[in-house]
Amino acid sequence: MAELYIKQAELYAEGRPCYPPELFDFIASKTPSHDLAWDVGTGSGQAARSLAGIFKNVIATDTSSKQLSFAPRLPNVRYQHTPPTMSSAELECNVAPQSSIDVVTIGQALHWFDLPNFYEQVKWVLKKPHGVIATWCYTLPQVNESVDALFQPFHYVSVDPHWDAAHKFIFNMYKTIDFPFEPVDGADHTGPFEFVTERLMDLDDYFAYFRSRSAYQIAREKGVEHLSDDVIEEFKNAWTEDGLDKKSILTITLNTFYTNDNALHGFGAVLSLDEPETLNKSLGFISACADKPFKLATTYSPEFLSLKASTGLWPASNYGKDIIIGVIDSGIWPEHPSFEDHGRPAGKVSSKWKENCEGGQQFNSSMCNSKLIEVRYFNAALKRKFRSSIVDSARDTIGHGTYVSSVVAGNFLEWVSFDGYAEGTTKVVAPYARISMYKVVWNEGIRCSDVVAGMDQAIADGVDVICIAMGYKQATEKLSTSNGLKIVGGSMFVGATVLENLPLVYSKTFSRCDSYSLSHAVPKGIVLFSDIGRLELQAKPIVSSNITGAILISNDPINLSIIIDIRCPCIVVHSRKARDLLSYARSSYQPLVSMEFRQTFTKSKPAPVVPLFASR
């Protein structure tokens, strides 16, 4: 690791953000005594400087002597150049005797270490039983919308090939790094905890920070200059938009974007309307899509899957014995009897499993067991809109995740009823399976990038099956014309309606439907609207009008039920399917069309639907 920072050691010391005092106050509050701290990978001493104001003595070590030469000299800080690995004797000589250190801190460096060996050293030097290990990383700097919109795709696409693989732990907020320690007193999880720092920077300072990064050095050694004249000019234009030379740069210890590197290789970012086009020109770019909200849905059951209790796949699989099912949903209520482990030995969990009970607030890690073996939560995308109201917890406040988990892999429960009605034993798909819950659904909503992050983590953890009961909820409907055309489209109109042989109305005068007045003036019949690229702009006037029915053309898979509560018979068809329909509407003297709603095409007749009260 040290060699990556030797060449720009001075730039590193000048360009890196300072850590907030609240971080060290928090660390100090968890250590009963403040005699001795060990700052590992101290670099140029950013953390050591702050620790020196709290602890009587600080030992600050690094494998780079050049970086240590830029560290501030303080009377109670001893800087020590150490080899990458140390024996117990070397550890005692270079650092401290056994059981003598109050706190071990690692800032922005843990991902570089030989973790099994390092953790053994930490356990050896920490005081017992009250020694504390604290590690943190910081996020990408946040300036303003214009600069950040330029920096984020630049960072994740242009710079990404030059990052060392270890940096992926930082991009994932250290959530996937091995950390085999118990939470400190007063906390029910090991983090991440969030601390914010601000620093006043001009554009030169901003570039100095960028040039201090290891990926920049690696790229230059390969003949690649990330900060080309064109890139610098783009940043200058974005930086000077507000007329301020110096800006307050925000850095936090909790990353606000996900990277997905198991099922997908990608990232989430806030982009301006023009940025996707710029990103499209970047090397390695494949595709981009808007971060859309999801809707919960629960429609399947053992009968729908044709599962039989005595024969076939169900008993042959031993009812899912020891299969790990990753449930992507609204969290879970761990005290529910469906998730008791009944003394099942935890040792039977597959050796491939990367267990992490990250329950957050009101969800102690001890609530996991041999049935409910893991919980995690993902809300970074949603927090960009609802930062203050979201409580970081995997506990289910909606009910859907608990319900789905109990149906998929809960225990058989006897004497269950709904206020005395329908008393009996619950039916479960895989009662002997284990559950890993990934909470991505919140009272405030569901974002696609949070869902993808949860799925990506489930794959990284090693689940056998992913259960997800949500999506762009859309039913399949049919329309037909008097000349024999039959077209399938999408709709979420709730009425069981059949519209037969009504006039198909199409006119350029009103078929764009981009104002309320035009939609009110159309004649009776089923109106065929043009594709203007924005379904939501058409949906609102349609709903507010007296239109009998509507056909909209769109290649965007976004669902009308996400945009607005559709209260009129509307079907969305793809432009490929709409060509013949448009031709028919233009050429026929009296075009007629019929539409059928509430058509669900499956082998089950009808497909099972879970009622609203099911989450109880």
Image: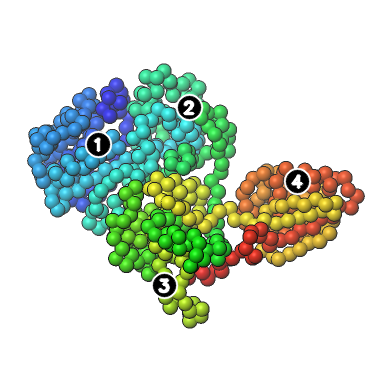
Spatial CA span between label 3 and label 1 = 47 Å
Q: Secondary structure at mark 2?
A: helix
Tell me the crowding category of disc 3: few under 14, some 14 to 19, or many 20 or more residues within 10 angstroms, Cα based. some
Does the CB distance between marks 2 and 4 fall below 8 Å?
A: no
x%, y% of residue 378?
A: 42, 51
**Residue under circle 3?**
413
Residue 36 as seen in the image, left or right of residue 119: left
Task: Please tell me which residue lies in front, 112 or 343.
Answer: 343
**Residue under circle 1?**
114
Does the CB distance between marks 3 and 1 fall below 8 Å?
A: no
Instruction: Say what amino acid the circle numbered 1 marks.
Output: Asp
First in sequence: mark 2 or mark 4? 2
At a point 36% along the width and 24% down the height, the residue shown is 218
Instruction: Say what amino acid the circle numbered 4 marks.
Output: Ala
Task: Please tell me which residue lies in front, 163 or 135.
Answer: 163
**Residue under circle 2?**
236
At a point 54% along the width and 52% down the height, the residue shown is 293
Evaluate whether residue 242 shows in this view. Answer: no
**Residue under circle 4?**
578
Q: Nearer the viewer, mark 3 or mark 4?
A: 3
Tell me the crowding category of disc 4: few under 14, some 14 to 19, or many 20 or more residues within 10 angstroms, Cα based. many
Tell me the crowding category of disc 1: few under 14, some 14 to 19, or many 20 or more residues within 10 angstroms, Cα based. few
Does the CB distance between marks 3 and 4 fall below 8 Å?
A: no
